Image (cartoon, grey):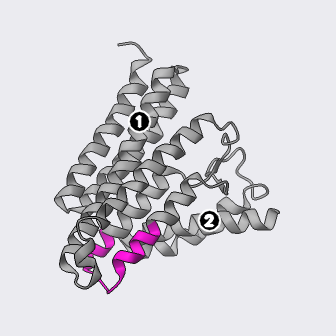
Amino acid sequence: MKLLNIPNIITCLNLISGCIATFWAFQGDYRMALLFIIIGAVFDFFDGMVARLLHVSSPIGKELDSLADDITFGFAPSAIIFSYLNESCAAANSTLCTLHSILPFVAFILAAFSALRLAKFNLDERQALGFIGLPTPANALFWGALIGGLQGYDIHFEGIEWCIIAGIFISSYLLISEIPMFALKFKTWGWKGNEIKYIFLLTCIPMLFLGIFGLAAIIAWYVILSAVNTYMLN
């Protein structure tokens, strides 16, 4: 087997994980869908690492990585939101009854903006040490954890569907925004120059006790802290 194929195989495992996550999303099991998004994120982390360790790269690998990411971190979370809205709208009354056949499809806007985000990332040379806009894996983990938590704890309130629709548009904006967001990459382990990263890691510890909602809270805090850090630097 050529060494070049090893990272591509790992990338394909990411893609397959996204396909399985989508299956569970359409089955209405959002926690299983989240699990396979997490598995896909692990494969996404290791395909790049393995490529660097083996000193191999190719244009095919780059294109394949973006395709896999849009399935796992774009289409799969959109399928989770679609299925949840489909169930929720079907059970609701008032104006949602007339919108039931249309409203859930708004979820797939997220898949389109995830694709735009990935295309932008491939062409943007500013994102070597950090990110410009919300990374697609973080966005996918947020939605998977949020919807999985709502299902797991059987949480529902009037108007929740509209809150989710608003969240879709906010996420879509963040994906392609020009907001700098830090990456957890360390050149040195000292405090100086890594303040924002250590603050983030330390403040995330209490959120771990929130269960599945803790993951969604961590992603939301990451966005807020990045925005605050950008504002202070300016």
Give the camera-side residue of 16 and 54: 16
Answer left or right for 231 relative to 30. Answer: right
Q: Residue at x 41, y 55 (%)?
A: 109
Mark number for residue 67? 1
Amino acid under label 1?
Leu
Residue 193 percent across, percent down from the top left: 77, 55
Amino acid under label 2?
Phe
Q: Earlier in the sequence, mark 1 or mark 2?
A: 1
Answer left or right for 59 relative to 79. Answer: right
Q: Main secondary structure of the magenta part?
A: helix
Q: Residue at x 31, y 75 (%)?
A: 150
Q: Residue at x 34, y 47 (%)?
A: 39
The image quadrant where one finds the N terminus is top left
The outermost residue toward the front is 98
The local crowd at label 1, few if under 14, some if 14 to 19, many if 20 or more residues have their Cα within 10 Å, is many
Magenta residue span: 148-167
